[in-house]
Amino acid sequence: MTVTLDTFKSPEFRGNFSKLPICQLLNGKNILFIKSDNIKLSGWVKRAEVENLLAQLQATPKGKKFTLPEGYDVACGTPFIHTYRNGNSESGLAFECPRIHVLASSPRMIEVNDKGAEAGIGRKGDIIGNFETWHGQSIRESHPKEFTTLRTLHMIYLVDTSGSFLHKVPLVLTVHGGAAAFFGQQLENFYKLVEIAYSDSQGESFYTLNEQARAVTVFQPTFDTELVGTDARAEVCAVVGFNEPTAENVKEFFNLPNAEKIWGTQQSLSGFASRYLKQFEKFHQIAPGVEVDEFPEEQFGKTMPKNQVDDLYHQVKQENLTALQQDEDPDNF
C-alpha cells in the first residue's frame, strides 16, 4: 500500500476534535462574539481579511467611526473590540444575527455558582450533575436554586448568507442560566416550525426531524437584553426571536449543498462536552460519577413511548425555564 496525504481522508484515520475553539454571548452587547485567538484555532476561511479589518479597526482614531468595505456580508461578522469586567480587552468578530448550524448539544449540566461556592457545596464552576437524569434533578432540588446554574454546550458552524462555512473547525457556544434557557427554548421553537413548514411543503402528515436533519438547518437568532434574577436586575443576552420558515421558503433553511460535510463532522463529535470541560478544567471539574455527554436512554430513550418522552421533555424544560430566569450570575463564559 502506498501512503499519500489522501490516505488520511479515510474514516479509519478520523479522530475526535480536541482543543475546541469557543464563542460566547456578550451580555449588554447582545452579540455572539469570537475572540481573535479562537478565530485562528477555528481555521477561519477568510482569516487574512479578518486580521486586516481588525488592524483597521484598532488604527481608527477615537471618535471616528469605523466603516466596513462596500458590499461586505455582515453575516461574516463585524470587527469588534470588547472590554471584559476585569478590564482586559479582546479583539474579534461580533455577530448580531448569526447564521448557525447546531451540530450537537450537551445535556444541561448542573454547575456550582458563586453563592454555591460560598455555601460550600463545591468550587465555582464544578459540574455536580446531569440535569437530564432523575438523579441530577434531585441534586439540583437538594440545594437552594440560587446555589447552582445550568450550563449547556452547543457545537456550531457559522455560515455566510450563501451558506458557505466561515470556519473549518466547529465552535463551542457555551451558555448558562437565563441565556441558556432563552437559547434552548428558541432553538426548540425553531426546529418545531421547521418541521411544520417542511410537512406543509410536502403535503403530508407531520414529520419530525432527527439530529442529523436538524443540523442541516440554519438557525438565525436575534438578541436583546432580558432582565433575570430574583430582583430582575441581572442583564443577559437573550435570544428573543429568529428568522422563521414557512412552507413556501423552508427549502432556504436547509443547507443542502453542505449536508454531507455537516454529517461527516457530526461523526467526530462524540464526547465533546467532557473534552471541553477537560480543556477548561481550571474552571470546570466534573464530580465523580457524573456523565455529561449523553442523554440517558432510561429517561429519554427506548424505554418510554415517544409521546411520553416529548411530554416529559417539554414539561421539565418549561419548569426549568422559570428557574433559569432567576439566575443571578450573568456571565455566559
Image: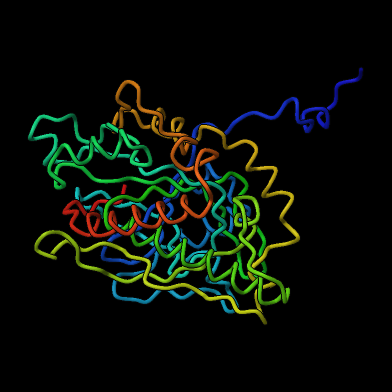
Instruction: State whether residue 247 is above or below residue 262.
Output: below
User: Disc count in the image?
Assistant: 0
Left or right: 308 with respect to 27? right
Left or right: 143 with respect to 182? left
The residue furthest right is 1
Residue closer to the observer: 217 or 31: 217
Left or right: 24 with respect to 225? right
Instruction: State whether residue 285 is above or below residue 56.
Output: above
Q: Tell me where residue 150 appears, x and y as whole percent.
A: 29, 46
Q: Quadrant of the N terminus?
A: top right
Residue closer to the observer: 295 or 169: 295
* Residue at the image position 58 percent from the left and 75 percent from the top: 245
Residue closer to the observer: 108 or 17: 108
Residue closer to the observer: 69 or 203: 203
Q: Tell me where residue 37 appears, x and y as whole percent.
A: 45, 44
Q: Tell me where residue 178 appears, x and y as whole percent.
A: 27, 57
Q: Tell me where residue 161 appears, x and y as whole percent.
A: 62, 70
- Check the image and tell me how it is coloured: rainbow
Q: Quadrant of residue 255?
A: bottom right
Q: Quadrant of residue 248?
A: bottom right
* Residue at the image position 55 percent from the left and 74 percent from the top: 69
The residue furthest top is 1
Q: Is residue 58 visible?
A: no
Q: Is residue 226 visible?
A: yes
Instruction: State whether residue 156 is above or below residue 291.
Output: below
Left or right: 187 with respect to 1? left
